[in-house]
Amino acid sequence: MSRVAWVVTVAALLAPSVALADPPFSMRMRPDPALMDPRVTDFGSPTVREPVPEGVAHAAVSNIIYLNRCTGGCRITKSGFPSNSVNNNTYIGGDIPIGSQFMISEFAFPQAVWDEFVQCMREVYAPYNVVITTDDPSPTPHHEAVVAGNTQEWGLPDGVLGQGEGGGNQCTPRDNAISINIANDHTGFAGLTVADNLCWTVAQETAHTWGLDHAFDCTDSMTYIPTCGRKYFRNLDLPCGENVERPCNCGGNTQNSHAKILGVFGAGTGPQLVPTLTIDAPQDGAAFPAGASIFATANSKRGLNHIEVLVNGWKWVDRPATTNSTYQIALPAEVPDGVMDLMVRACDDIGVCAEDMITVTRGAACTTADTCALGQRCDGGRCLWDAPTLEVGATCEFPQACLSLTCEDVNGGLICTEECQGGPNDRCPTGFECGAAVGEPGLCVPEGGSEETGCCSVNGGGGRAVAFQLGLGAVVGLIAVRRRRRKKA
């Protein structure tokens, strides 16, 4: 199978047969790693977003994906627009006359490869309310992923591995579509097994049917970049593109493939890929000397996103974690001594976490709140904060009392507030406005009070107060770092 550096355009190739239809969204060729510019594999750290489903302004589509291995061969009919998976009619494919029938040879690899591929597809789509089946559900509406044949049988050029349908203008989910996945031309590639390589192709081509564009990031199923191992639909704001970044076809400069699919189907309820985590040291019940570190081993098939440490129910550490590894984690010096219930969590990019917990003692167990941090109480030798109860606008002394976990000096007094972006849609609660210019970050303040609001600082006074400013070498995630909100355990 020939290799080219990147994608070729399909519209020109297919114009004679689909002139009145939306063109196929993808005709994917795989790059040879030797031809790749190494710069395209260095993407920094994309931003994880809360997976808020996008508004669904389209008719519901079937959540069934039928993986068709064409046992004994498949008879496909080349049709005009649109395709119909129930009747095995498709408008995509190569230069085959409309109305003609052609045969696709069956999946050519051993049963073990098929089983591995099917399991991969179920894991990739597990976060969504999607049914992966290997039995033809016709006449029930469904998406059909044909996983068989070679490029000659599909009438496509050598090197093509798959082709998918876009929706209306390539952005709207489409029902009863067919995706072409040229299984018999696949090989193991760039560290992927044949099954994982197939899984990458089929996940991408099916997802074009839900309106997804290509992603310029090697970890996402919508990428063309072969490195980084098995791909998943990532809860990351990623640039679109094939060999270079470009504006996304459906608007904007980034795409969150996880959020888009979640917006079409909703969340899955079946088995999920769950990370594993074990605290290696210290041992449960041990003394925990000042300055000692926690060692924890975390693994995830999907990959990790961050690791957290909670002490007596409060998240003191939240740091990036991308590889399956043993992590050394130091607690901030501001954590008060005493009995500590240490919980370590390892989470992936969609918020699925594993956790382990031990109890240790550092220094002497507290007997009163005098040795605890501001606002904490002593209970059973442990320094801990009660659950927050104060709404935005309430007077506060420390951030942990606020439901927003933000206590700031606003016009000369400490109140509970929250982060915002200057209007017109600042999302502050009724009676509050964002004390910042349009488009700039700020804090919610009482309406009419923004003119006097400048840079705010939280209460750091008192011998028992938590330090609210950290040096550059401090462990990330200390709860009192100013203007961080998502710190709830």
Image (cartoon, rainbow, N blue to C red):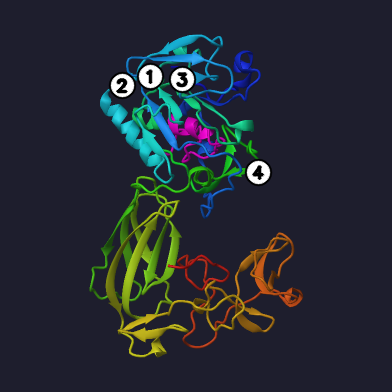
- Front-lying residue, 326 or 116: 116
The secondary element bearing badge 4 is classed as loop
**Side (left or right) of 318 relative to 91:** left
Q: Of marks 2 and 4, which one's residue comes earlier in the chain?
A: 2
**Side (left or right) of 139 relative to 193:** right
Q: Which residues are magenta?
A: 201-228
**What amino acid is labelled 3 in the image?**
Asn
- Quarter of the image containing the C terminus? bottom left
How far across and how far down the image is residue 30, in percent? Answer: 48, 26
Compute the Cα span from label 2 to label 3.
23 Å
Badge 4 crowding class, 10 Å Cα cut-off, few under 14, some 14 to 19, many 20 or more, is few
Compute the Cα span from label 4 to label 3.
35 Å
How far across and how far down the image is residue 123, in percent? Answer: 37, 41
**What amino acid is labelled 4 in the image?**
Gly
- Front-lying residue, 86 or 357: 86
User: What residue is disc 3 on?
Assistant: 88
- Front-lying residue, 174 or 445: 174
The secondary element bearing badge 2 is classed as loop
The secondary element bearing badge 1 is classed as helix
User: What residue is disc 1 on?
Assistant: 184
Q: Of marks 1 and 2, which one's residue comes earlier in the chain?
A: 2
Front label number (1 vs 3): 3
The answer to whether residue 367 shows anywhere in this view is yes
- Numbered label attached to residue 109: 2
Compute the Cα span from label 1 to label 3.
19 Å
**What amino acid is labelled 2 in the image?**
Phe
Quick check: 249 above or below 177?
Answer: below
